[in-house]
Image (tube, rainbow, N blue to C red):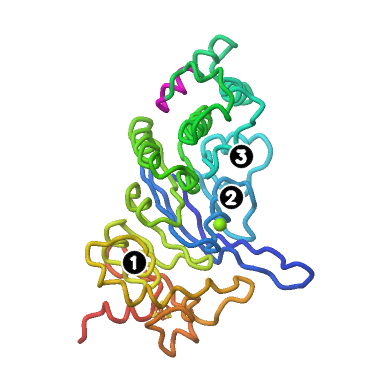
Amino acid sequence: MLRATNLTKEYPVRGGENVVQALAGVSLELGEGETLGIVGESGSGKSTLAKLLVRLEDPTSGTVELDGVDLTKLRGKALREQRQRIQMLFQDPYSSLNPRQRVGAILTEVLGVHRLAGDARGRARRVGELLELVGLDPRLAQRYPHELSGGQRQRVGIARALAVEPKVLLLDEPVSALDVSVRAEIMNLLDDLRRDLRLSYVFISHDVSMVRHISDRVAVLYLGRVVELGDWKSVLDQSAHPYTVALGAAVPVPDPTLAEPIHATVIGEVPDPANPPSGCPFHPRCPLAEDVCLRTEPKLLSLRPSHEVACHVAIRDAVPAA
Ligand code: SF4
Ligand code: MG
C-alpha cells in the first residue's frame, strides 16, 4: 500500500555548509488494513518522516510510493489527487482547527474543496454522517472549536481527515495533547474506524504503551535511522536493540528488573543530529557498546522471521555458537 524506500532528508545548518541529516536511509512498508507504529524520542526524525510520507516536504533522496505510484515525482493535480488518499491527523487538534469557523463549516469546506458529497444539501447530510462516525452528536456542527472539549476537538480532526475518504491515515502523536482520561476513548475510536473503514495507519509516538496498543508492526527510530523493525510482539516483548529495551523500560513492564540497568544508562541526551557519533549512532548511550560499535554503523539485519535489528551485538549473540 505505502512504501518508503531509502528516505533521506538533509537540512542545511544555519550559516554553514554543513547539513543535519534528519533521516538517513529509512525504508518502511505499510500493508492494507495494517497499523505501523513508529516509536522514538523527540529528535529521532519522527516528524520529518511524517512530513515526507504525506509529501508536505520533499526528501533529499529516496521515494514514497502509494499503491505503486511514486509520490515524490508527482506535481500539481496528480499530486493533489494522491494526497487525498493519505491524510494526516495532527497532535494538537486545537491549533489545526480554524477557531473562527463552526465545526460544520470546517467539514463543509473540506468537502467543497475536494468536490465531494454533491450539492449543499448533500454536504450538510455528509457532515452529520461524519460527526456520527466519530461518535459526536451532529448538532455539534453549530459549535465553534473553543466550545468543545479536547477529546471532541480531536474527534472533529478525525472527521475532517476522513471527509476525503483516505486509504491511509498518518497519526502523529494523536492523543499526546489530550487528558489521560480521554486518550483510551480516542485510541479505541481509531481502532474501530480502521476496522470499519478498512484504513491503514502510520501511528507515530514517543509513547511505547500507545504504540503497543494499536500496532501490527513497529519501527523504532533513532537519530533518523530505523534501528529495530518487525511484528509488534517480537519487537516490544523480545526487544533486541538496547535502545528499544531502554524505551520499554520507560513504561511499567511485568518484570521491571529486566530493563532497569540499561534504562539507567540511557538517560543521557540524544546526540546532536548535526554531529552524529561515529559507527553506531547509539554508542555513546549504549551499555553494551564494544570497539566495533565506534567504528562501523550496524546494518538492519534479520534476527528472526519478521524481526530486524541494527545492532552488532544483538545480531552476533543471536547466532548460536557453532
Ligand atoms: Fe550498542 Fe553496539 Fe548495538 Fe550500537 S551496535 S546498539 S553501540 S551494542
Ligand atoms: Mg519531532
In 3D space, how far apart are the residues under numbered discs 3 and 2 (Cα atoms)? 17 Å
Which residue is situated farthest in the top direction here?
A: 121
Q: Residue at x 53, y 65 (%)?
A: 224
Circle 2 residues within 10 Å: few <14, some 14–19, many ≥20: some
Which secondary structure, mark 1? helix
User: Is disc 1 surrounded by few (<14), some (14 to 19) or many (20+) residues within 10 Å?
Assistant: many
Residue matched to label 3: 95
Q: Are marks 3 and 2 in contact (CB under 8 Å)?
A: no
Q: Is residue 150 magenta?
A: no
Closer-to-camera residue (57/305):
57
Tell me which residue sits at (67%, 26%) in the image. 100
Question: Looking at the rendering, in which quadrant would you find the N terminus?
Answer: top left
SS for callout 3: helix
* Viewer can see residue 280: yes
Check residue 131 for magenta coloring: yes
* Residue receiving disc 2: 51
Dominant secondary structure of the residues highlighted in magenta in the image: helix
- Residue 182 occupies quadrant: top left
Residue type indicated by callout 3: Ser
Distance CA(mark 1)–CA(mark 2):
29 Å
Q: Magenta stretch? A: 128-135
Residue 22 screen position, x and y as percent: 59, 64
Q: Which residue is mark 1?
A: 249
Among the 4 quarters of the image, the one containing residue 220:
bottom left
State the residue in front, 41 or 215.
41
Q: Amino acid at mark 2?
A: Lys
User: Mark 3 Cα within 10 Å, few/some/many (few <14, many 20+)?
Assistant: few
